[in-house]
Image (cartoon, coloured by chain):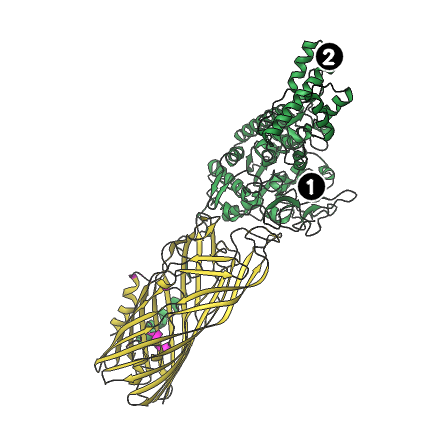
Chain colours: A green, B yellow
């Protein structure tokens, strides 16, 4: 029987040692592979997209959900090293700048007492605590070199930290460049997503800046300090190739991303350009109003000596017909001899910006502000009377066309499109020439804007606030969209370098933040 | 005989394996050592649980059995598509049991038992991939049961008695996969209640066709634990008036958790003066557990389909009286999971298992013996998912590969007078 006891004892010991273990544990070497890539020192270079800027601000959870940070967690499965980020001090967003106004806090989605969404409002539940004067670079630069606001030529701009507090707070020195601080880390792998701001600033300001493809200005030091201009295509190509040359100088491999069509961002697609919704009576009176305007202009031109046929020809452009239902808004243009009032109706492809005053739109901005005085003159006209020049002016002044800064018009759209095509050709060509992985993120944004990208909990679209793809500033991605970008990059590095890594599940990443903690 | 023992222990390893829900079969050290058989084994006061009818056949006037086991459980999870893995960090479960019987006269015995047949303690890392289903759960039900045992003849007896149950639950999980407060802390809900009481009963019978051969039957009724007015704590929800967004703070909850009925039939055969073989068949009526529905005091609800099926366990035990002081025991069982495919929730990640048990008794004095037991539950790894979680009306399955193990050494005392 002693033998039996011995067997039992052996069995007991054997079983105690039996911790559960999978046949093929995912956390063991050999399941995934880094292929030809070496992720031990991954440095991400770019702008606000790379930084994790969202909801109009930079804050900790946005940074933690930035695509480079998510990517680094996947890279960690195949030898990826620590990925450091210049984290802000809080989740309020906002940035305190000595001697200047603080940058805005993040936006949150506010609901009214009936549970109806009111819209994005600046979060005021806590004070911003990140001080731009406090440089957090203690000798080692950060793996995430994304700097909100940076343009392609800013990356190599010495002393950029003095111009951009987001870089100033983690630049290695007062004269440091973003690209210099990136290269100094001797990355084994890099990502580069830059150029968005080279057209975005122009687009989000309604094209009030200069298109330097049109001006031919190739000196970026003379470009708009507020970032309102379109960077010249050749300037872009030159700066971009220098960045690639620098980042690959030590033989590092990397991935580059192209530039999505900014005009499909919710910032440009949320406010419809035909939101002038009229009933039949109002449509009729507006049509009548512009008949009156046409008459007044004809009379004024004729009075100024223009031949009557020409006067009628010029004035006829104001003979705008309004219909029951949605109508396109009016847009302010330059005052010229051929368009003496300086306005026209928008075309269907032109876009209103998210920042337009929608309250004003409801009060006649974009059409006509029909005051009692205006109606009085219209009544006079209908009765066959002849208005005085002052009364004519009253009518003409009632026209409230939309300002240039609230609209991306056809010419501006074309300028944006031309620049983007050129930039993207440059990016693709340099990726190919240097054997870099290339992620066509523009293609995915097209899909998000046209039907959406399915995930395990629904579909991610570009619809403002509810689509799941864009944060409350209408421009920057949500964590969920950062997850999509991560997966796109993983696909690209698989194709180019044979990297086998698991994708992330976008459903586990959040979208917009709701909060009523606002003033 | 040694060969037979080895056969029982090892030859069946290759069989398909089985385990069940939040049923914890550790209701007696002696029975445990024999594969948790006992419906037809007349051995100790453990019969209060296994078959009260048999108490009247115990030789001694007073019988007391007390025991405790330390249950070490571990569950690992991974999803190779997403490259994620998790492991539970469960504390050691310590189910207790205490049984006593007293023979009033030749045909009547009475007894009392305190035991914990249901419970579950699973602690995943907070905010793990399945945290929208469970972060941690601690469920316990204590059964207190007086029994009576009546001998109708030397061949047949009946028994049974009422059961008083007092249960407790503590359960935490995240509100969904993404909602956080402004600082990114995941919104979560904890429900906590204790002193949830109810009554049930058991009936049993024992038939002894010969001196060496016994047949047993035991049925324990279903008991529904109804938590009313328990405490629910909502934490880290965003401050908002958005629809379906509960306020942070404490409210009440109501929920029902079934402790299913269990039917046992079995036999024991004293095939040699030193050897006893036992076989039990358990049928657990888990189909009562259709859904775990929580209704909160703030109007929120949580519907969690479970759709369990009835399940069986097949138990084999051997006892060898090595000397007058030492008895050795071994057992094996197949434990079927009540969890159906697509309903594999990580709060009770049980698939079919097989149990290996062993143990011994050492008589310190003729009256007092020390009982020791262990069991090891072996689970195959399994690719499973829980498919009934929804976001915005759309099913969002949570799945991957799971593997569990459980090991429990136990100690007890048997006293007879």
The residue positioned 44% from the left and 63% from the top of the image is: B74
Extreme residue in the right direction: A99
| Residue B335 image offset from top left, x and y in percent | 33, 65
Q: Is residue B16 above or below residue B398?
A: below
Mark toward the start of the polypeptide (1 vs 2): 1
- Residue designated by label 2: A302
> Is residue B71 at all visible to an observer of this figure?
yes
Circle 1: element type: helix
Q: Is residue A315 left or right of residue B222?
A: right
> Is residue A436 at all visible to an observer of this figure?
no
Q: Is residue A67 above or below residue B139?
A: above
Quadrant for the N terminus of chain B, please.
bottom left
Majority SS type along the magenta span: loop
The range drawn in magenta is B14-40
| Residue A104 image offset from top left, x and y in percent | 70, 43
Give the quarter of the image for residue A5: bottom left
Q: Is residue A329 left or right of residue A73?
A: right
Circle 2 marks a residue in which chain?
A
Residue A167 tag number: 1
Reply yes or no: does residue B26 show up in magenta.
yes
Which mark lies nearer to you, 1 or 2? 2
Quadrant for the C terminus of chain B, please.
bottom left
Circle 1 marks a residue in which chain?
A
Q: Nearer the viewer, residue A51 or A446?
A: A446
Circle 2: element type: helix
Reply yes or no: does residue B294 show up in magenta.
no
């Amino acid at each position: 029987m002693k033998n039996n006891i011995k067997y039992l004892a052996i069995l007991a010991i054997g079983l105690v040692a039996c911790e559960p273990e999978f046949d093929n544990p995912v956390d063991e070497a050999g399941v995934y592979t880094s292929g030809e890539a070496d992720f031990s020192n991954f440095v991400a270079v770019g702008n606000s997209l790379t930084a994790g800027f969202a909801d109009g601000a930079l804050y900790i959870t946005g940074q933690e959900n930035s695509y480079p940070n998510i990517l680094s967690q996947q890279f960690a499965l195949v030898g990826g090293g620590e990925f450091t980020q210049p984290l802000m001090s809080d989740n309020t967003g906002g940035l305190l700048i000595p001697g200047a106004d603080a940058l805005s806090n993040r936006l949150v989605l506010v609901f009214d007492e009936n549970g109806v969404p009111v819209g994005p409002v600046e979060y005021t539940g806590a004070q911003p605590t990140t001080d731009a004067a406090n440089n957090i670079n203690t000798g080692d630069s950060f793996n995430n070199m994304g700097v909100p606001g940076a343009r392609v030529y800013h990356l190599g701009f010495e002393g950029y930290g003095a111009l951009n507090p987001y870089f100033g707070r983690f630049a290695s020195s007062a004269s440091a460049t973003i690209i210099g601080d990136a290269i100094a880390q001797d990355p084994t792998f890099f990502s580069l997503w830059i150029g968005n701001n080279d057209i975005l600033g122009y687009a989000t300001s309604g094209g009030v800046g200069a298109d330097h493809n049109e001006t031919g200005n190739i000196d970026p030091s003379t470009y708009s300090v507020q970032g309102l201009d379109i960077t010249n295509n050749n300037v872009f190509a030159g700066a971009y190739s220098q960045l690639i040359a620098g980042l690959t100088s030590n033989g590092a491999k990397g991935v580059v991303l192209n530039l999505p069509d900014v005009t499909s961002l919710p910032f440009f697609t949320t406010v419809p350009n035909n939101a002038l919704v009229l009933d039949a009576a109002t449509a009729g009176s507006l049509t009548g109003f512009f008949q009156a305007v046409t008459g007044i202009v004809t009379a004024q031109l004729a009075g100024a000596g223009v031949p009557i046929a020409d006067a009628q020809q010029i004035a006829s452009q104001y003979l705008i017909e309004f219909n029951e239902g949605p109508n396109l808004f009016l847009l302010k243009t330059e005052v010229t001899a051929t368009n003496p009032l300086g306005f026209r109706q928008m075309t269907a492809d032109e876009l209103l910006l998210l920042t337009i005053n929608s309250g004003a739109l409801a009060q006649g901005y974009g059409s006509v502000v029909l005051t009692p005085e205006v109606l009085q003159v219209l009544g006079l006209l209908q009765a066959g009377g002849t208005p005085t020049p002052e009364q004519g002016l009253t009518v003409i002044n009632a026209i409230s066309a939309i300002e240039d800064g609230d609209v991306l018009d056809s010419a501006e759209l074309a300028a944006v499109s031309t620049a983007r095509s050129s930039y993207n050709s440059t990016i693709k060509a340099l990726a190919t020439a240097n054997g870099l992985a290339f992620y066509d993120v523009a293609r995915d944004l097209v899909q998000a804007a046209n039907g959406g990208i399915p995930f395990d909990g629904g579909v991610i679209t570009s619809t403002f606030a509810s689509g799941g793809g864009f944060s409350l500033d209408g421009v920057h991605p949500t964590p969920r969209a950062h997850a999509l970008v991560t997966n796109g990059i993983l696909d690209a590095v698989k194709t180019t370098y044979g990297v086998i890594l698991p994708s992330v599940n976008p459903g586990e990443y959040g979208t917009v933040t709701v909060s009523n903690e606002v003033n | 005989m040694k060969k037979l023992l080895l056969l029982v222990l090892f030859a069946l390893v290759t069989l398909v394996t089985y385990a069940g829900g939040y049923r914890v079969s550790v209701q007696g050290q002696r029975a445990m050592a024999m594969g948790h058989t006992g419906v037809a084994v007349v051995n100790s006061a453990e019969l209060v649980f296994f078959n009260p009818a048999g108490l009247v056949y115990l030789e001694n006037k007073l019988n007391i059995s007390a025991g405790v086991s330390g249950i070490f459980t571990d569950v690992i999870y991974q999803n190779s598509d997403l490259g994620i893995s998790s492991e539970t960090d469960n504390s050691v479960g310590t189910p207790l049991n205490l049984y006593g019987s007293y023979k009033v006269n030749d045909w009547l015995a009475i007894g009392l038992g305190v035991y914990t047949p249901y419970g579950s303690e699973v602690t995943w890392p907070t905010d793990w991939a399945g945290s929208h289903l469970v972060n941690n759960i601690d469920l316990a039900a204590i059964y207190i049961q007086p029994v009576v045992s009546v001998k109708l003849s030397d061949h047949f007896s009946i028994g049974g008695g009422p059961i008083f149950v007092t249960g407790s639950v503590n359960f935490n999980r995240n509100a969904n996969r993404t909602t956080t407060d402004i600082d990114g802390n995941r919104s979560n809900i904890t429900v906590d209640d204790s002193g949830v009481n109810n009554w049930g009963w058991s009936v049993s019978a024992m038939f002894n066709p010969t001196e060496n051969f016994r047949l047993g039957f035991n049925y324990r009724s279903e008991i529904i634990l109804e938590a009313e007015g328990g405490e629910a704590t909502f934490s880290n929800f965003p401050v908002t008036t958005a629809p379906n967004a509960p306020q942070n703070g404490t409210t009440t909850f109501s929920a029902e958790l079934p402790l299913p009925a269990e039917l046992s039939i079995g036999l024991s055969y004293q095939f040699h003066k030193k050897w006893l073989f036992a076989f039990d068949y358990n049928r657990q009526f888990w189909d009562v557990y259709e859904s775990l529905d929580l209704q909160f005091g703030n109007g929120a609800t949580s519907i969690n389909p479970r759709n369990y099926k009835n399940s069986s366990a097949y138990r084999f035990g051997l006892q060898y009286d090595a000397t007058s002081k030492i008895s050795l025991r071994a057992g094996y069982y197949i434990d079927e999971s009540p969890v159906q495919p697509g309903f594999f929730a990580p709060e009770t990640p049980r698939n079919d298992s097989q149990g290996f048990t062993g143990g011994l008794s050492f008589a310190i004095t003729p009256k007092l013996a020390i009982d020791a037991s262990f069991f090891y539950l072996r689970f195959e790894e399994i690719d499973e998912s829980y498919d009934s979680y929804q976001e915005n009306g759309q099913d969002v399955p949570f799945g991957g590969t799971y593997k569990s193990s459980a090991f429990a050494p136990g100690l007890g005392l048997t006293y007879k007078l």
